Image (cartoon, rainbow, N blue to C red):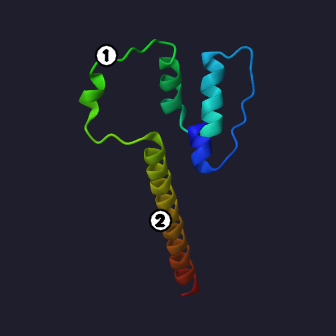
Amino acid sequence: MQTARILGKRLIVLPFPLITIRLSRLWVSLVTGAPKATVYPLIESLAHPVVARPGHQDELGRGVRGFDEAARDALEREKEERAAQEREGQERAEQGDDEHER
């Protein structure tokens, strides 16, 4: 819900009575476009309970940021990376056009 709010999108939740790990792996791969090599182990790990130790968060670092700030920063970096990739692609296309005209 937080990510949808930050992106300015409406979250649509569809109840699904039976969801298996196998179906979850496929769904996450489809929706995110993330490679199966990343998604499958991640989804399979959700079947195991994870319990945080008391004080464990202290080991993670001192630069505590809220979810909203971290998500906005990540989305901004992603946007900048896409823009840079588009510029590189345009430059390559222009170089190709220049070489073709010669």
- Quadrant in which the C terminus appears: bottom right
Circle 1: element type: loop
Gap in angstroms between the C-alphas marked 2 and 1: 41 Å
Front residue of 59 and 90? 59
Q: Secondary structure at mark 2?
A: helix
Between 95 and 60, the residue placed more toward the observer is 60
Inspect the image, locate mark 1, and give the three-letter code of the amino acid beneath it.
Arg
Q: Which residue is mark 1?
A: 53
Residue to which mark 2 is pinned? 84
How crowded pointer 1 is (Cα within 10 Å; few <14, some 14-19, many 20+) is rated as few
Q: Residue at x 65, y 37 (%)?
A: 31
Viewer-nearest residue: 68 or 35: 68
Q: Position of residue 64 (x, y in %)?
A: 33, 40
In the foreground, 95 or 51: 51
Instruction: Indicate which disc, 2 or 1, sits on the residue closer to the N terminus.
Output: 1
Which residue appears at 49% of the width and 31% of the height?
A: 37
Q: Residue at x 47, y 12 (%)?
A: 48
Residue type, numbered disc 2: Ala
User: Residue 96: where, in percent of width, then height?
Assistant: 54, 76
On screen, residue 80 versus residue 18, left or right, reads left
Does residue 95 sit above or below 41 in this rendering? below
Using residue 88 as the reference point, say whether residue 32 is left or right of it.
right
